[in-house]
Image (spheres, rainbow, N blue to C red):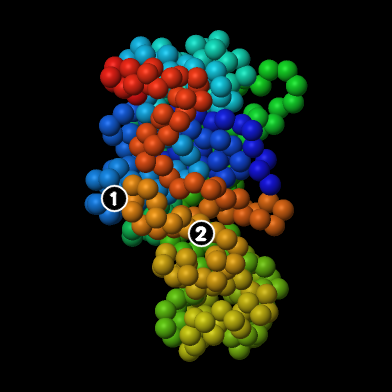
């Protein structure tokens, strides 16, 4: 099922939030054209832990969120390049960019200008703080947003907080929020579809912090860094086993009772310190010590099987490599493989969307593109002749 088939998206964004948004749209069937500045292109092309790939402008960071796209280079600082870009805009349904507010206006390509060219254009602008407010002009990367959203302050424990989340969660959530908003705009029925979407990464992240923020607003409780503990339930956290650690989330009363039976700790059910949710929260440290003493008698795999069999949510703590090696990942088609990728010179693997539509994981046919790989092809589709394309190259417009 390709729900966005027939829609054309212009991806004018860099690094993660915008490219991740456009990548989701590509997997849902949209045609995505990645517009990059000549010579260097998207900064992500130079980012990653494989230096050779960075030098080839096919960095591992770039590969992660650019499959299913075609790449065209356009120099928007030339009049000829602007003309080409405007011709593309007339053919598009969506434009995604993640510049600081005002950059597109300074290029003479702001929403008002592009709307005159294409009244139905869905224009999605992703920025650190949004298009309005006192912070709108500030530069922002993922870590800046993690810090200013309160995320870092509640990550880790009392000794280690504030800590950055281990992957760029603010960029990723910003991109997902944008993809959601774009899809909603495209779903409008009847009349003009043209819409300006203003995505604030700061607000996107804070929107996902509902538990913590609601408790601050409505329960007069300041959110705290609690490490691997769950502030709403106990036992719900990380425990020691004979060969490592295990996560257990016995959040419901029946789950706590089932866990006690499996661990041979039925006496806890009669102990007023642990008989109720509220009592367990108040005595969580003592309860964790008791559970750790028993859990250390068997391996993580043994406890995982025993507890899951009685409906107690639990699981091992895996490395990224171990997580990817789980049969569950392969069984659901989460990872796509591209053979002998141009510009890379070898096979690559990339994760997909994490969803299934009518039982099938959305896929894209093409690997991440080389810089400008499809420039001539796309310009030809716009009606430009080989001579005109050659002239644009001589003018350094593409």
Give the quarter of the image for residue 243: bottom left
For the image, the number of numbered tags is: 2
- Lower sequence index among marks 2 and 1: 1
Q: In this rendering, does residue 178 appear at all? A: no
Between 126 and 209, the one lying in front of the other is 126
Going by the image, does 391 lie left or right of 292? left
* Disc 1: CA contacts within 10 A as few (<14), some (14-19) or many (>=20): many
For the residue labelled by badge 1, is the local secondary structure a helix, a strand or a loop?
helix
Q: Position of residue 339 (x, y in %)?
A: 43, 57
- For the point 52% across and 35% down, the residue is 32
* Disc 2: CA contacts within 10 A as few (<14), some (14-19) or many (>=20): some
| Image vertical order of residue 157 relative to residue 257, above or below | above
| Image vertical order of residue 179 relative to residue 322, above or below | above
Q: In this rendering, does residue 80 appear at all? A: yes
| Image vertical order of residue 362 relative to residue 145, above or below | below
Q: Position of residue 192 (x, y in %)?
A: 68, 17
The disc placed on residue 25 is: none
Between 259 and 94, the one lying in front of the other is 94
Q: Can you identify the residue that label 2 sits on?
A: 335
Q: Residue furthest right?
A: 190
Give the quarter of the image for residue 315: bottom right
Q: Position of residue 173 (x, y in %)?
A: 50, 43
Going by the image, does 244 lie left or right of 124? left
Q: Position of residue 291 (x, y in %)?
A: 52, 80
Q: Can you identify the residue that label 1 sits on?
A: 53
Quadrant (top left/top right/bottom left/bottom right) for the C terminus: top left
For the residue labelled by badge 2, is the local secondary structure a helix, a strand or a loop?
strand
| Image vertical order of residue 227 relative to residue 267, above or below | above
- For the point 57% across and 50% down, the residue is 363
């Amino acid at each position: 099922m390709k729900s966005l088939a027939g829609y054309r998206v212009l991806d004018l964004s860099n690094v993660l939030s915008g490219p991740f948004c456009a990548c989701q749209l590509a997997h849902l069937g949209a045609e995505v054209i990645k517009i990059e500045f000549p010579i260097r292109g998207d900064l992500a092309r130079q980012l990653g832990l494989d230096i050779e790939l960075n030098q080839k402008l096919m960095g591992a960071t770039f590969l992660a969120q650019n499959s299913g796209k075609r790449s065209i280079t356009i120099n928007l600082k030339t009049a000829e390049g602007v003309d080409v870009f405007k011709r593309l805009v007339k053919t598009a349904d969506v434009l995604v960019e993640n510049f600081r507010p005002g950059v597109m206006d300074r290029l003479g390509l702001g929403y008002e200008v592009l709307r005159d060219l294409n009244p139905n254009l869905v224009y999605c602008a992703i920025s650190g703080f949004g298009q309005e407010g006192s912070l709108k002009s500030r530069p922002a990367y993922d870590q800046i947003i993690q810090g200013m959203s309160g995320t870092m302050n509640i990550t880790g424990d009392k000794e280690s907080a504030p800590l950055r989340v281990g992957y760029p969660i603010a960029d990723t959530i910003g991109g997902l929020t944008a993809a959601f908003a774009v899809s909603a705009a495209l779903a409008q029925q009847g009349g003009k579809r043209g819409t300006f979407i203003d995505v604030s990464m700061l607000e996107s992240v804070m929107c996902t912090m509902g538990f913590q923020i609601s408790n601050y607003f409505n329960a007069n409780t300041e959110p705290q860094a609690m490490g691997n503990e769950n502030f709403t339930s106990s036992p719900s956290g990380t425990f020691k086993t004979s060969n490592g650690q295990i996560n257990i989330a016995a959040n419901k009363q029946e789950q706590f009772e089932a866990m006690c039976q499996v661990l041979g700790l039925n006496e806890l059910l009669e102990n007023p310190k642990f008989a109720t949710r509220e009592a367990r929260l108040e005595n969580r440290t003592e309860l964790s010590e008791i559970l750790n003493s028993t859990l250390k008698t068997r391996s993580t795999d043994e406890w995982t099987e025993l507890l899951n069999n009685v409906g107690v949510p639990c699981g091992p703590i895996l490395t990224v490599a171990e997580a990817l090696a789980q049969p569950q990942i392969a069984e659901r088609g989460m990872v796509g493989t591209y053979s002998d990728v141009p510009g890379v010179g070898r096979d690559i693997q990339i994760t997909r969307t994490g969803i299934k539509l009518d039982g099938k994981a959305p896929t894209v046919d093409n690997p991440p593109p080389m810089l400008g790989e499809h420039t001539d092809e796309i310009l030809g589709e716009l009606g430009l002749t080989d001579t005109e394309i050659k002239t644009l190259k001589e003018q350094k417009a593409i």
